[in-house]
Image (tube, helix red, strand yellow):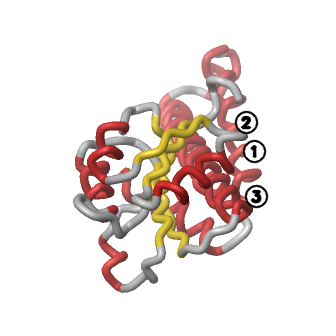
């Protein structure tokens, strides 16, 4: 494991289960565990990229922890990993995905990979659209000859082409309708 691996915070009041999840994913990610909502909030930092969060916990519930994380402005993905079957109350909740226990090791890894790929897609697509806008603006204001001879503009064109390929690859890598929905919900929530 290296320093560039994503940080994952596992939050569950069932210590044995939290420790099991941490052991499973600790081979691939930097993992911390919290056994209640207060402890989870005290361990939150800008380095945390994914929170695996139980909904039903004594004291501060997972729903309340989620709300606090979002209110504090942490830029992380939150996956609810819980025995609570989803109901209409989830519509207004700011989580990125939802797993109903029991959860297998493979399901946990697939979910983490899915939310991480959405994050990469989100970043690429935002940069892509920003650069496409700059390119279009320059093309509307400058003569074609001037654009062809400008090194910065050519670098911009190259970067736009690179990002287009990365975005296309990310889209083709999304395996389900849920992946697409999740990626676009992430983009909407940031705007």
Is residue 77 visible to us here? Answer: yes
Say which of marks 2 and 3 sits in front: 3
Question: For the residues marked 2 and 1, what is the alpha-carbon distance in whole angstroms?
Answer: 5 Å
The residue wearing badge 3 is 173
What is the crowding at mark 1: few (fewer than 14 residues within 10 Å), some, or many (at least 20)?
A: few
Q: Is residue 157 above or below residue 75?
A: above
Q: Is residue 142 above or below residue 88?
A: above
Secondary structure beneath label 3: helix
Q: Position of residue 183 (x, y in %)?
A: 55, 60
Report the disc number at residue 162: 2
Say which of marks 1 and 3 sits in front: 3
Please tell me how many numbered marks the rendered image carries.
3
Q: Quadrant of the N terminus?
A: top right
Work out whether mark 2 precedes mark 3 in sequence or the reverse, and give the earlier one.
2
Work out whether mark 1 precedes mark 3 in sequence or the reverse, and give the earlier one.
1
Question: For the residues marked 2 and 3, what is the alpha-carbon distance in whole angstroms?
Answer: 17 Å
Q: Which one is nearer the viewer's eye here, 39 or 185?
A: 39
């Amino acid at each position: 494991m290296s320093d560039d691996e994503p940080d994952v915070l596992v939050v569950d009041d069932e210590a044995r289960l939290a420790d099991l999840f941490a052991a499973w994913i600790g081979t691939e990610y930097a993992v911390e565990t919290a056994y209640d909502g207060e402890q989870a909030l005290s361990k939150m930092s800008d380095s945390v990229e994914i929170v695996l969060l139980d909904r039903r916990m004594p004291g501060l519930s997972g729903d309340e922890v989620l709300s606090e994380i979002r209110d504090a402005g942490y830029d992380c993905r939150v996956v609810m990993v819980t025995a609570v079957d989803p109901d209409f109350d989830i519509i207004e909740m700011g989580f990125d995905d939802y797993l109903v226990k029991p959860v297998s090791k493979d399901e946990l890894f697939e979910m983490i990979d899915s939310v991480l790929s959405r994050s990469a897609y989100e970043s690429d697509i935002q940069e892509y659209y920003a650069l496409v806008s700059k390119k279009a603006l320059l093309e509307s204001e400058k003569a074609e000859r001037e654009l062809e001879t400008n090194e910065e503009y050519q670098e911009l064109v190259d970067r736009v082409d690179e990002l287009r390929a990365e975005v296309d690859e990310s889209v083709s890598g999304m395996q389900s309708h849920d992946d697409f929905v999740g990626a676009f919900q992430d983009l909407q929530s940031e705007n």
